[in-house]
Image (cartoon, rainbow, N blue to C red):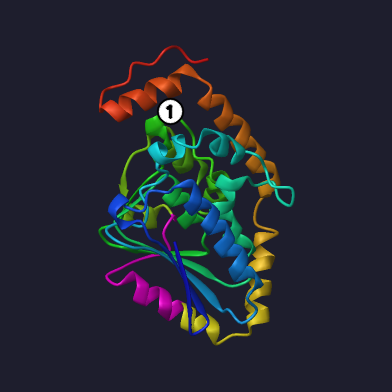
Amino acid sequence: MDYDVQDQVAYVRLNRPDKHNGLTLDMLDDLAKAADRAKRDRNLRAVLLTGEGPSFSSGLDFASAAKEQRRLLMNFVPKRTSAANNFQAAGWAWRSVPVPVVAVVHGHCYGGGLQIALGADFRFAAADADFSILEAKWGLIPDMSLSASIAQLTTIDIAKRLTMTGEVFSAQQAHVWGLVSEVAVDPQAQALTLIAKIKERSPDAVAASKALFENTWYSGSRLSFPVEQALQLGLLRGENHAIARTAAMNRETPEFIDRH
């Protein structure tokens, strides 16, 4: 992952283009560290989240993560200073950064990649971008802060539908459902135009505006994150997850057992 500051804007780039920016455990750690770095930079006025190569992010690289079983399990442990664990912090940590965070999305934005994008304050998407809460394919639920972020953006029936089906949907549909701020021919240019407008305002007022809504909009991450954690750990121990994982890896149709 790259972190570069230009003209008071931090450009944070997922940089694993040959794997469609599939997320490794190192990348998740780096995202949380980048958010902390941005939070401490008092001269910063905005953050731009992007992905190198053909996609924003195809989600968690399960093959890579599975090679580090102990570290993978440790990522489920909540941090002392927050209800979020390492998975959730990769997306949600941007909410505590006192400047606008804008995600620019192109290509695939799946699973954990979508949850990182939803952790931003704004999302600008290319017309050919596509999206999916892909965890359903693996017999899992999204557990990287989506339960908190999606509640601010769309209705509960849409959230349930996308989480239960894992269906792939277009940028235009994402905009209709409220998951994308704007669809544009040049989404990065549009994002920078918005950032330029915000930079005309007091940085203290901008920070206060963000804090106002983050602290009043919904019931709170401390309530939703433990629920995500408990449900996901139960699924990971279940036989139907193993069935879904094996079928997905072999590109077969899964045959599930009865609900536990």
* Whether residue 183 can be seen here: yes
The x and y percentages for residue 215 are 70, 59
Q: Quadrant of the N terminus?
A: bottom left
User: Is residue 181 located in the magenta-colored stretch of the structure?
Assistant: yes
The x and y percentages for residue 181 are 43, 64
Q: Which one is nearer the viewer's eye here, 78 or 118?
A: 78
Q: Which one is nearer the viewer's eye here, 177 or 57?
A: 57
- Residue 205 figure quarter: bottom right
The x and y percentages for residue 17 are 31, 57
- Residue 74 figure quarter: top right
* Whether residue 154 can be seen here: no
Residue under the point 38% across and 60% down: 15
Q: How many marks?
A: 1
For the record, the magenta segment spans 178-194
Residue under the point 42% across and 78% down: 192
Secondary structure under tag 1 reads: loop
Residue under the point 37% across and 32% down: 137
The x and y percentages for residue 114 are 43, 51
User: Is residue 160 located in the magenta-colored stretch of the structure?
Assistant: no
- Above or below residue 42? Residue 215 is above
Around disc 1, counting alpha carbons within 10 Å, would you say few (fewer than 14), some (14 to 19), or many (20 or more)?
many
The residue that mark 1 highlights is 139
Q: Which one is nearer the viewer's eye here, 3 or 195?
A: 3
**Direction from residue 191 to residue 82 in the image, left or right:** right
Residue under the point 59% across and 52% down: 89
Q: Residue furthest right?
A: 80
- Above or below residue 219? Residue 36 is below
What is the three-letter code of the residue carrying label 1?
A: Gly
